[in-house]
Image (cartoon, helix red, strand yellow):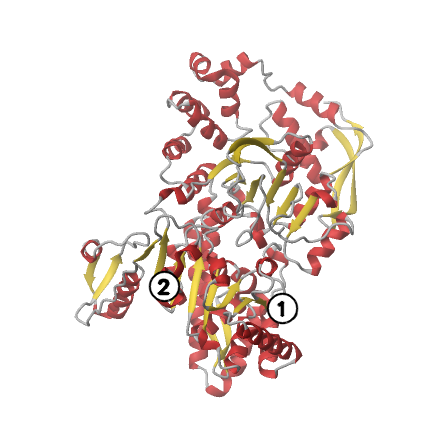
């Protein structure tokens, strides 16, 4: 089933490759590859050229899954790890295809590495007597839902020091794990069963060391599940991720698996991956019905804090979506009285639960299981609330499940009626959903085919605000500055006397802990021989490129968001192609009149116009005019704002109206924070068509005030708040 190409290129082939198209999903003949290569003779880059070509060709491997197969276990002997390259990338393509189940129930000895403790616990709960779950109390939970500005920057280094002590010192934790693994191995051996060990990335080194000491490590296949998180999590624990990759280099096997691997551009930037054979599991070629196109409704929002409570209230009011599914051969109408919310912020989740007055029996919170998160939840919501578990099959989920990134990937939800709601705000680092990788993963969480909403979700987003935007040129300049600083530091280390290198490396290490890669990309590797060796932390560098792409490109505006989503999920969908083409032209228009005219005269069907209007936004006047009057009436009014608003009976702005509106909506003697003033004034300005940018100080034009300062609890933290007390009305 596999087709491998390992060309041998000789030294006479000395060329600089200016452009090489990559073919991950196809298997073109060598001639078609070579004819697209622009070449210029350049002897100095011979080795690079050979490396690139060999790498490219190695990756042209497809595994065509035969018709009639839905889960990997059904392949039987046709799929075995020994038939794969000992180290490779596997794009399983289809979430829920049972790859993890194969790892647990297949015939091979497996070390299954996962980035999340909660996911491993979920698998342990489903396979209680089949697997051994490594529980390392020294390992801190990876807080992928934590505000990045408040992260403990020394987390990675502290853990690695403890890990060194554990492995080298053979402490009590190590000894306990050694004895437990021995007992598990003997138990499974007595029944002639293969060994299945579940472990996080962080604790893999311990397992490897123990199995080597038992003389059986070589009999295991190491599976790195959801390996794209190695890059993503480098924001939180870059040093431990580097450590993990270093240990994997020493392992005889490493199968990097994901349904949403890193994008091609990132794989090519990381030496640990760019030479690996790439196995693409093709589920659609033999039977396209196995790959269901996700149905994603894309909508704009002002904020998570306003939109999510609206949805919750709708559920509490009994406004449930309904659908028909087949039950025992008969069509049966079902209602969705369960909702799963994907929002990567514990602070936001807690605030929303409190605002909506939800009770513990209504809520399941799935987030990083840390003392900090539990304290945050119970301090604001009460002792009845806790961090939950992913419900097992057959267990009725609660009405509302809140998920942080902890369960964006790998978790198995077995609801028969839950709907999924995804929230993304690119202006808040923790809330930005990676469209290319997070979205497909989330859409694969619901596992039951009898859930009518299994493959559907509603995606609410907020594009990048102008104040957060930076140009590609600005970003590239900063990137080059940090890369140069890194090169300078590495050269300084290399040229330093041998007796000074240790102290210099310690200085670099201290700076990394203090500044967390703010000024350069230097990391200090403690596991190259017995020395401290400064290295380029390419994971951090590439992750910064990824973060720029997400915020500045994918979420540049609402139109790029739409296009990126549908190019990722359903690029061959005719409707979405038409919408993307329209939005690309629409975005370039400079006036409201021109945009309104284009919208009315483009000739959309009713089905398409609905998708278009969703992207224009709830509060856009163009959308309001279209819905209120329709294209024919707008055409008759010549798309003129004056005549449109006259037709709608909209009162135009006047200073008298502004004055009266302000005085009527603010009360003497009340105190208003500066932030509340700005929001309230903005709402009033919008109602009367006043186009000025609201500022808290605007209130000084209408009232005599007294300044105040107070301490308030906001999102669980005490903060100093400034504001004004309104004393006396000014008559203007």
* Disc 2: which residue: 274
**In the picture, residue 307 is in which quadrant?**
top right
Whether residue 416 can be seen here: yes
Quadrant of the image for the C terminus?
top right
> In the rendered structure, are the residues bearing label 2 and label 1 in contact, judged by CB atoms less than 8 Å apart?
no
Numbered circle sitting on residue 258: none
Per the image, label 2 sits on a secondary structure element best described as helix
Q: How far across and down, in percent of the image, does residue 566 sit?
A: 42, 40
Left or right of 150: which side holds 581? left
Q: Residues within 10 Å of mark 2 (few under 14, many from 20)?
A: many
Per the image, label 1 sits on a secondary structure element best described as loop
Q: Residue furthest left?
A: 12
Q: What's the residue at 69%, 40% (across, down)? A: 675
Q: What's the residue at 40%, 40% (across, down)? A: 570
Q: How far across and down, in percent of the image, does residue 567 sit?
A: 39, 42
- 2 vs 1, front mark: 1
Q: Residues within 10 Å of mark 1 (few under 14, many from 20)?
A: some
Q: Considering only vertical position in the picture, is 685 above or below 312?
A: above
Mark nearer the N terminus (2 vs 1): 1
Left or right of 4: which side holds 376? right
Q: Nearer the viewer, residue 365 or 475?
A: 365
Report, in whole angstroms, how far the alpha carbon at label 2 lies from the one at label 1.
32 Å
Q: How far across and down, in percent of the image, does residue 506 sit?
A: 55, 78
Q: Nearer the viewer, residue 724 or 651?
A: 651
Q: How far across and down, in percent of the image, does residue 420 sit?
A: 56, 41
Q: Nearer the viewer, residue 533 or 166?
A: 166
* Disc 1: which residue: 135
Left or right of 313: which side holds 528? left
Q: Residue furthest bottom?
A: 499
Quadrant of the image for the N terminus?
bottom left
């Amino acid at each position: 089933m596999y087709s491998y190409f390992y060309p041998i290129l000789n030294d006479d082939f000395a060329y600089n490759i200016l452009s090489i198209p990559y073919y991950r999903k196809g298997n073109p003949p060598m001639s078609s590859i070579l004819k697209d290569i622009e070449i210029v003779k350049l002897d100095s880059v011979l080795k690079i050229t050979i490396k690139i070509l060999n790498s490219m060709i190695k990756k042209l491997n497809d595994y065509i899954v035969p018709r009639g197969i839905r889960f990997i276990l059904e392949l039987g002997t046709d799929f075995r790890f020994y038939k794969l390259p000992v180290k490779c990338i596997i794009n399983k393509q289809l979430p829920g295809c049972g790859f993890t189940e194969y790892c647990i129930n297949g015939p091979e000895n497996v070390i299954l590495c996962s980035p999340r403790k909660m996911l491993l616990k979920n698998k342990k709960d489903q396979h209680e007597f089949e697997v051994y779950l490594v529980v390392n109390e020294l390992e801190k939970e990876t807080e992928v839902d934590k505000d990045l500005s408040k992260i403990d920057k020394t987390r990675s280094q502290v853990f690695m020091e403890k890990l060194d002590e554990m492995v080298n010192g053979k402490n009590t934790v190590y000894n306990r794990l050694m004895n437990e693994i021995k007992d598990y191995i003997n138990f499974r051996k007595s029944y002639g069963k293969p060994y299945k060990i579940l472990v996080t990335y962080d604790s893999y080194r311990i397992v490897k060391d123990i199995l080597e000491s038992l003389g059986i490590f070589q009999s295991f296949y190491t599976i790195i599940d959801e390996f794209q998180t190695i890059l993503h999590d480098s924001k939180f624990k870059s040093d431990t991720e580097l450590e993990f990759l270093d240990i994997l280099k020493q392992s005889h096997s490493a199968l990097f698996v994901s349904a949403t691997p890193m994008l091609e551009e990132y794989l090519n930037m990381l030496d640990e991956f760019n030479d690996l054979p790439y196995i693409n599991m093709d589920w659609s070629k033999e039977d396209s019905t196995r790959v269901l196109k996700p149905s994603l409704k894309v909508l704009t929002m002002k904020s998570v804090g306003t939109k999510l409570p609206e949805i919750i209230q709708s559920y509490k009011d009994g406004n449930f979506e309904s659908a028909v599914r087949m039950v025992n051969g008969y069509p049966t109408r079902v209602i969705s009285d369960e909702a799963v919310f994907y929002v990567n912020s514990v602070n936001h989740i807690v605030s929303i639960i409190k605002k909506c007055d939800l009770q513990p029996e209504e809520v399941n919170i799935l987030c990083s299981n840390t003392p900090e998160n539990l304290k945050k939840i119970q301090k604001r919501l009460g002792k009845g609330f806790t961090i939950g578990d992913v419900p097992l099959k057959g267990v009725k989920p609660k009405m509302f499940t809140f998920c942080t990134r902890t369960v964006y990937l790998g978790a198995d939800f077995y609801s028969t009626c839950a709907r999924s709601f995804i929230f993304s705000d690119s202006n808040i680092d923790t809330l930005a959903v990676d469209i290319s990788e997070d979205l497909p993963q989330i859409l694969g969480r619901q596992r039951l085919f009898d859930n009518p909403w299994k493959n559907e979700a509603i995606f609410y987003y907020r594009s990048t605000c102008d104040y957060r935007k930076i140009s590609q040129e600005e970003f590239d300049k900063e990137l080059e500055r940090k890369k140069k600083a890194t090169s300078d530091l590495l050269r300084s280390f290399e040229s330093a006397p041998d007796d000074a290198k240790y102290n210099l490396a310690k200085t670099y290490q201290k700076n990394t802990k203090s500044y967390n890669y703010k000024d350069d990309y230097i990391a200090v590797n403690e596991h190259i021989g017995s020395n401290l060796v400064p290295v380029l932390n390419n994971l951090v560098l590439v992750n910064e490129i990824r973060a720029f792409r997400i915020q500045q490109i994918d979420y540049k505006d609402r139109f790029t968001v739409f296009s990126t989503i549908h190019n990722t999920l359903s690029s061959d969908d005719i409707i979405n192609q038409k919408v993307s083409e329209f939005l690309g032209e629409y975005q370039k228009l400079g006036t409201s009149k021109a945009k309104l005219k284009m919208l009315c005269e483009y000739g959309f069907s009713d089905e398409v116009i609905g998708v278009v209007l969703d992207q224009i936004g709830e509060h856009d006047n163009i959308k309001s005019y279209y819905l209120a009057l329709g294209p024919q009436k707008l055409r008759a009014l010549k798309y003129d704002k004056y005549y449109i608003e006259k037709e709608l009976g909209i009162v135009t702005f006047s200073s008298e109206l502004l004055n009266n509106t302000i005085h009527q909506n603010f009360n003497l003697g009340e105190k208003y924070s500066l932030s509340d003033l700005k929001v309230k004034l903005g709402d009033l300005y919008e109602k009367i068509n006043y186009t000025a940018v609201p500022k808290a100080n605007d209130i000084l034009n209408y009232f005599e005030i007294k300044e105040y300062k107070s301490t308030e609890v906001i999102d669980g933290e005490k903060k100093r708040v400034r504001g004004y007390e309104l004393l006396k009305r000014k008559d203007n």
